């Protein structure tokens, strides 16, 4: 039985104004239901541009994207109901409380009334934030802010969750909690697309990864398969450096 991809990307290309080289170059990729898919690459490789296009933040120059069978160019309003987005930069209003922020984002997803209130309370309790729900975000630690940021992207129980560097700059306890939570919701059917610079984290978390550099996929597969192909390299970080080089990227 053939499994239909939940995300189908074909010849995706993106040029930014004033740049001769594309940020993404004819990228084609299938992501399947239930995967935790890692999109990995050095700075400027095209990861965030790809995620931004998949989330509908701006259109591609060329190519097509289908999410859950819907075309990103024509069905974006419908797609927004099945995807959740957790950006690298905190998408929270610092002078509002966690409760006020989550109510705002829930309303954006069309959630209202008792359903929204109960879902917010459920998430706050699950994320250990119930007692500080009425405190302003600007009083929170980095890990607490990351947890609220994650809740904002999954309040509506999306089929597909996009995460751009979800564990950057946080304490170990918050990082482990977030990774455990992602694995738990993945087991219930949520497909996760995830970017990170933490190669060990990606190796342990992801079912498949794509390493991207200069807008193109240069390696694709399960972490274990990529390691078997290169037995002289002992982990995903070594493969990453072998393929993308050690030159600093700004």
Image (cartoon, grey):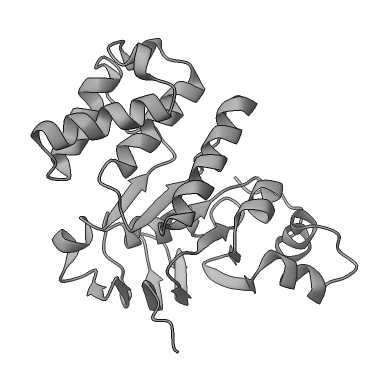
| Residue 138, x across and y down, in percent | 36, 13
Left or right: 147, with 242 as reference point: left
At x 21%, y 31%, the residue is 118
| Residue 54 visible | yes
Where 127 falls versus 191 (above or below)?
Answer: above
Picture quadrant of residue 153: top left
Where 113 falls versus 40 (above or below)?
Answer: above
Where 60 falls versus 42 (above or below)?
Answer: below
> Which residue ends up furthest to the left in the rendered image?
113
Between 240 and 32, the one nearer to me in the picture? 32
| Residue 106, x across and y down, in percent | 19, 37
| Residue 170 visible | no
Left or right: 91, with 196 as reference point: left
Left or right: 87, with 223 as reference point: left
Image quarter hosting the N terminus: bottom left
Picture quadrant of residue 228: bottom right
Between 208 and 246, the one nearer to me in the picture? 208
| Residue 226, x across and y down, in percent | 73, 70
At x 33%, y 58%, the residue is 159
Left or right: 118, with 110 as reference point: right
Image quarter hosting the C terminus: top right
Picture quadrant of residue 240: bottom right
> Which residue ends up furthest to the bottom in the rendered image?
1
At x 36%, y 12%, the residue is 131
At x 38%, y 43%, the residue is 86
Between 68 and 22, the one nearer to me in the picture? 68
């Amino acid at each position: 039985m053939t499994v239909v991809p939940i995300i189908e990307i074909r010849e995706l290309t993106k040029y930014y104004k004033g740049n001769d080289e594309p940020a993404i170059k004819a990228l084609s990729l299938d992501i399947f239901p239930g995967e935790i898919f890692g999109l990995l690459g050095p700075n400027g490789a095209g990861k965030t541009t790809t995620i931004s296009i998949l989330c509908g933040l701006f259109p591609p120059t060329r190519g097509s994207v289908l999410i859950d069978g819907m075309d990103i160019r024509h069905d974006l309003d419908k797609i927004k109901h099945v995807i959740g987005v957790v950006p690298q930069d905190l998408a929270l209003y610092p002078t509002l409380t966690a409760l006020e922020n989550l109510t705002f984002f829930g309303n954006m997803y069309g959630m209202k009334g008792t359903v929204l209130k109960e879902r917010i309370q459920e998430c706050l309790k699950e994320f250990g934030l119930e007692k500080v729900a009425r405190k302003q975000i600007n009083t929170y630690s980095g890990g607490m802010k990351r947890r609220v940021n994650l809740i904002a992207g999954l309040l509506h129980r999306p089929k597909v969750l996009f995460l751009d560097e979800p564990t950057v700059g946080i304490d170990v306890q918050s990082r482990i909690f977030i990774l455990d939570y992602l694995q738990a919701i993945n087991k219930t059917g949520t497909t996760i697309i995830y970017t990170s610079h933490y190669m060990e984290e990606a190796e342990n978390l992801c079912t498949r990864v794509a390493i991207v550099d200069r807008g193109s996929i240069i390696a694709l597969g399960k972490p274990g398969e990529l390691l078997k192909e290169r037995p002289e390299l002992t982990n995903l970080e070594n493969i990453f450096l072998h393929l993308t080089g050690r030159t600093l990227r700004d």
